[in-house]
Image (spheres, grey):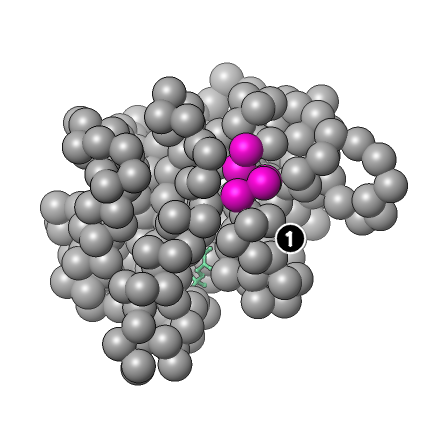
Amino acid sequence: MRKPIIAGNWKMNKTIDEGLAFIDDIKARVKDTDVEVMLFVPYTLLKTMKDYTKGSNIIIGSQNVYFEDQGAFTGEISPLMLKDVGIKHTLVGHSERRQYFNETDEIVNKKILKAIEHEIDVIVCVGEKLEEREAHREAEVVRTQIAGAFKNVEADVLNRIVVAYEPIWAIGTGKTASSKDANDMIAFIRSEIEKLYNEDISEEMRILYGGSVNPSNIEDLMNQDDIDGGLVGGASLKADQFVDLVNF
Ligand code: 13P
C-alpha cells in the first residue's frame, strides 16, 4: 500500500510569522489524516517551522539542496545545513529550478545522490513543457528526465525517493492535466522505474501529480490508480484550501 502524500510547495512566499500562523490554523484540522502532510517552505522559515511542528504530523522540508557538503558556493544550501536544523526532506529539480536556474538532469541527479548520502528524503520533479506536449514528445521528455535523475541511484535507497509529475503548462495556470492524462503519465513513469529497477520497486514508489491541484479536482485525481498524491503550489498557501486537500 502506497501512503498518499499531500505536499505544499510554498515557493518564494510567506514570512516566519505567516508560516507559524498557517500552522496554528491547520494543525488540529490535519492531525487525524492517513495522508502524509508535507510543507516545503523557504529557507528562512525552515528552522522555526520545524521546531514549531515538533510532535505533529506535519513534515517541513526544503525546496532545494546543493550537491556539495560545503565550500565556495555562494548562495547555496548544503544538506549538512538542512540536517543541522532538523530537516530530512527536500524537493529536487522543480521545473522552476530547471527553467530559471538552469538545473539540468545531471545536476538533479547529483543533488539526489548527495541528499540521499545524508539521509535526506527527496521528492524529484519531472514534467514536460507545453511545446513538448504539443509536439507529442512528453513521454520522451519525461523518460529522459527519469533516466537522468535515477542514474547511479541504488535500489536500496528508492524508498527515500518520491517522484512528482508536474507538467509545466499546468503549473500556476489554472489548467490541470485531466485526471486521465495525469494518471497515464504517472503509470508511464512507473513503467520506466520498473525498467530501471524491478516491478516490486515500481509498485512501491510513490508518484505525485502537481499542476493547479485544488480542492475541487483533488478527489478526482486521487481516485486514479497510479496517482499517490499532490504537490501543490498556489492552493497550499491558503490554510482552508490546504486542509481541504489533506482531507480530500
Ligand atoms: P500550482 O499548484 O500553483 O500550479 O503549482 C504547482 C507546483 O509547482 C508545485 O510544486
Secondary structure mostly seen in magenta is helix
Q: Nearer the viewer, residue 143 or 65?
A: 143
Whether residue 155 is visible, yes or no, is: yes
Residue 97 spot, x, y in % from top left: 59, 58
Instruction: Specify start and end residues of the magenta stretch as a single range.
Output: 109-113
Residue under the image location 64 percent in, 53 percent down = 14
The residue to which callout 1 is attached is 14
Q: Quadrant of residue 163?
A: top left
- Amino acid type indicated by mark 1: Lys
Residue under the image location 46 percent in, 45 percent down = 149
Say if the magenta span includes residue 112.
Answer: yes
Ligand 1 is in which quadrant of the figure? bottom left
SS for callout 1: loop
Crowd class of label 1 (few under 14; some 14 to 19; many from 20; radius 10 Å): some
Q: Nearer the viewer, residue 153 or 119?
A: 153
Residue 9 spot, x, y in % from top left: 50, 50
> Is residue 116 left or right of 18 when viewed as pictured?
left
Residue under the image location 42 percent in, 55 percent down = 145
